[in-house]
Amino acid sequence: MREIVRWFLLAVLPFTLVGGKLALAADPGSMLKAMADPAGAPFFPVVMQVLQVLTWALHMVFVYTSIGGLFIAIYGFIKGGERWHRLSKATIELSKVSVSLAIVLGVAPLLFYQVIYDPLWYTSANLSAWWYVLFIVFLLIGYYFIWGAYFMKEKPSLSLFMSVVGIVLLLLVGFIIHVVNYQALFPEKWVSWYTSNGTTMNISGWNIYAFNIFRYLAFLVFPSISVSGVFLMLYNWYFRNREDMDRDYLDWAGRVGAKFALYAGIGWLLFHILYILTIPQDWNAKTSIFTWLSVLGLVLCAGVILAAQKDPAKMAIPSLLAGGVAILLIAVFREYLRIASTARFGYSIYNYKMNLEFLSPLLFFGTLLTGIILYAYAWWMAYRAGKTPKGKVYEASEMEHHLGDASVFIVVLWAVVFIGVGLIVIVRNYG
Ligand code: HEM
């Protein structure tokens, strides 16, 4: 038996080595082009790119409040005392709601990314396939623990324990998605990673090939605390005029939030700059205008939050706007890095063959518009209703009733069109 194995290895090894060397010699540009969908893009890639950037920014806002909410809850439970306990309960609730929004809003950039960057996304996901599959499992378990922390919120030690498990799992999920996104930026290394420099085939899917601690801290950990701090300022601003709320507690929560926002914001800026310094030289991206703008956005945001320390409630909306601009500029910078990395190999999404199709984008934009109208109405009503003291019922104005009718109408219309299109397609295919 041993002999057979020996002869088998002797016969096969030279081929794997030669194959590995051949694969290593492949030019990343042609490899990327060969892996891209031959059908080309179904719509103008730049439109998908813009939507990808916008939806990623939205996705991240809720990722940040999921993790930051838990962080503040844990901090509060450890500090102890009535106010901190009350704040912890509020931020667990924030985290619980945010995870569901982060998941829903994560689907949108995923769809755009898959369409315009399929070679990057699928290769990187396959390189660490098991981790990527486990991403969902960890997320699910983490989410259950957050619900557990929420149900146990009157029992601080149990709720604290569940919050800790929840945050660890969400950070692990963030780690996995970071790895998958980061590995995707190095097409020139994929083959050597996969073949351990042309010597074998790493098919297990258990390997992690690249991780950048600065990017992880700058894109996930520090913004989570900072953004959730701004959320506490908004919490202060929103509830402080409600007669049944404790204004002292709210002002205190606003001040705590402003401090979290500032200190974590400084860390965010620092690690963002450190990350920029690690960007490889041949990407020619370190001093690009997009890089500068992302730093500038963070500096301006830090300035507004510094000014907010005196009166967090008054500065809550300017801080929200400044934070929004900073996150958008970072989203643009992040996308720019992908362009810079792939441009080294002459690869560009703008060169895709176009297979223009108008009905699907029309359906997509119609759905988007319906969603915007529906959510605008629902959020506006939630905003108004939340201002009503406990025990009283909010009476909607005539205008709001009309808006409600319009929302119901547009959703029904959307359902008719959506199901109608499906039926027409089925009849056409089988008719
Ligand atoms: C609550 C758990 C989640 C966390 C903590 C998280 C965290 C992150 C982080 C840190 C990034 C940026 C990584 C980097 O560039 O280094 C990211 C990007 C991304 N996330 Fe999430 N994520 C979560 C859930 C999800 C879900 C459920 C989806 C899909 C349904 C998703 C889809 C995406 C996509 C597609 C990107 C890349 C988008 C692009 O490059 O434009 N995420 N996420």
Image (cartoon, rainbow, N blue to C red):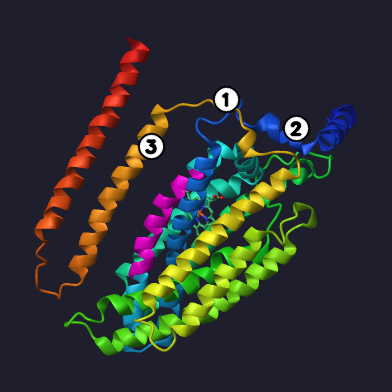
**Residue situated furthest top in the rendering:** 431
Q: Secondary structure at mark 1?
A: loop
Look at mark 1 in the image and give the residue it sits on: 39
Q: Residues within 10 Å of mark 1 (few under 14, many from 20)?
A: few
Q: Callout 1, which amino acid?
A: Ala
Residue drawn at point x = 20 percent, y = 47 percent:
407
**Pointers 2 and 1 in contact (C-beta within 8 Å):** no
Look at mark 2 in the image and give the residue it sits on: 30
Viewport quadrant of the C terminus: top left
Residue 364 numbered mark, or none:
3
- State the extent of the magenta-drawn residues as a range: 93-110
- How far across and down, in percent of the image, does residue 187 sit? 72, 43
**Pointers 3 and 1 in contact (C-beta within 8 Å):** no
Distance (Cα) linking label 2 and label 1: 17 Å
Q: Is residue 103 left or right of residue 200?
A: left
Pointer 2 or 1: first along the chain: 2
Q: Callout 2, which amino acid?
A: Ser
- How far across and down, in percent of the image, does residue 266 sit? 58, 78
